[in-house]
Amino acid sequence: ATSFIRYQQAHQLDELTEVVLRRAEFAVDFAGASLGELARRDLADCGPATLQAIRLHVYQRSAIKDVRLVNPDGSVICSAYSETLEFDKGWIDRRDMLPSHDKNLSLFRVEQFGGDALGVLKDINGNAALVAILGVNASLFDIMPAELRAHSEVILALSNGEKLGEFLLDPDKALQAPIDLDKNSARFPLHATIRLERGILSTWNNEAYWPTLAVAFAIGALFGGLFARSRRMEGPVADLDRGLAANEFKPYYQPIFELKTGRIKGCEVLARWLLKDGSVVPPMNFIPLAESSGRIQVMTWQILRSALSDLQPLLKANKDFKLSLNVVPKHLLSAGFIETLRRTVMAAQVSARQIVIEVTERDELDDLARAAAVVSELRDCGFRVAIDDVGVGHSGLSRLKGLGANTIKIDKFFVDTITVDASTATIVEMLVALAKDLQMTVVAEGIETEEQVRALISSGVEEGQGYLVSAPLPFPRFNELVESRCLAQSAKLPTDAALVA
Ligand SMILES: Nc1nc2c(ncn2[C@@H]2O[C@@H]3COP(=O)(O)O[C@H]4[C@@H](O)[C@H](n5cnc6c(=O)[nH]c(N)nc65)O[C@@H]4COP(=O)(O)O[C@H]3[C@H]2O)c(=O)[nH]1
């Protein structure tokens, strides 16, 4: 704001200096024109009639104080008002007069008692010239605005520095820490100066200070915002956004199989971030950030759409095949979740009964009543709901019961220990009993060995997933796996669970 106001002040002072010059140039033009007119009237001698005519001419033009006829060397022959010659303190030689762009006009200072004047000489013929004597002080007194007048001085001088006139309200009072603004005339050897006390600038024309400060503040805030945004564009969230825009989040598929037969009954969709350099980022490196930055919803819908488009033929051909999708609790409970899910699944022409929404039990489902209502509505629409990572989460068995899901997924932790720890087998049996009681199915996660399969079967678990059959696979490889299993089954080949990846 201060800079802006200083800029405006400098601009105004520059214009005032320009006015000083323009007035002086105008006076010189006027003098030149007047002398030209006298020359045309052949008033170039010192006869009484001529002087009378010139006096009338001068009288009619208040800016001109006197007109004198001079020799080519500049010395005075006569003056319209001869008595004014007594006021002269000096008269310079023609050679010291300053030429101007108009070759016929020369300018010089006329030193007089009571104040200097500007002399304008115009050649009229080879024998004589005319000089108009102009008082310039009268053109300077009203230049400065009233509030600056007591703190400033206006000076008009010749380009050689000789002062022609000045306005200073109180000549006895020196200006405090003055600054000068100078300007030269392009047409005449004239120089204008405005001299001003520096301190007065802090109060002059400051009305715009607060509005300008507000505008400066707003612009600052705008640039601050843009800067912060550009910084955000460089962070990990910006990377997520770029990945989402470039559709880099892809579904991988892990088969869910029947433990006794190895038959693939469905799959879990697991997100992977496929970077341009070919590297694959695992979900734990981006799902938490996607969740905390609010990008998880867009990401989930992007992955579901891709999965539906990949699996649509398989889902249509095999109505028992199920697709399981991970959904974070916050997303599940958000407004419009079920509606968007329905529209997305319908658009893919897939039956809702083939879609399983997996909600992790790791994060507490704070509002159990609301979660149960959403689960119930999902089930009314035909969708199935699974509770993921059961056994390691926050909820007790009573909360599991209250949620009303179709499936519980037993965490890998139990599968890892079921063959080595008898108490694990007991917990798994309890979970299976509870699930049966609630008409829920059970899927065991992270099965890596045949031994684990046998232990799970004897605890009553019917379905599972794990590296024993396959790690999560990109669609083409998953499709190959499913097709090869189907072929094997139709040929009644043994369907031993075999590590695929
Ligand atoms: N060591 C071992 N691991 C096995 C075995 N079988 C399966 N797994 C891994 O266990 C995880 C099972 O998924 P989850 O419990 O839903 O756990 C998932 C899920 O909570 C989350 N996640 C993955 N994709 C998505 C998604 O699209 N949306 C959301 N909200 N979460 C997702 O990230 C978690 C980790 O996913 P992944 O890294 O793919 O890890 C997967 C899978 O690759 C096995 O035999 N051995």
Image: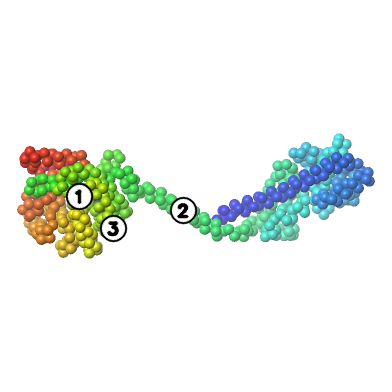
Q: Is residue 350 left or right of residue 76?
A: left
Residue 117 position (above or below residue 105): below
Secondary structure type for disc 2: helix
Q: Which quadrant: the C terminus?
A: top left
Residue 316 screen position, x and y as percent: 18, 45
Out of 44 and 228, give the one closest to the viewer.
44
- Residue at 53%, 57% (x, y): give it: 213
How dense is the environment of label 3, judged by Cα within 10 Å: few (below 14), some, or many (20 and up)? few
Whichever of labels 2 and 1 marks the residue nearer the N terminus, that label is 2
Q: On the image, which quarter does residue 387 sit in?
A: bottom left
Q: Disc 2 vs disc 1: Cβ atoms closer than 8 Å? A: no
Secondary structure type for disc 1: loop
Residue that label 2 marks: 222
Residue that label 3 marks: 334
Q: Is mark 2 within 8 Å of ligand 1?
A: no
Q: State which mark lies toward you, 2 or 3.
A: 3
Q: Which residue type carries mark 2?
A: Leu
Whichever of labels 3 and 1 marks the residue nearer the N terminus, that label is 3
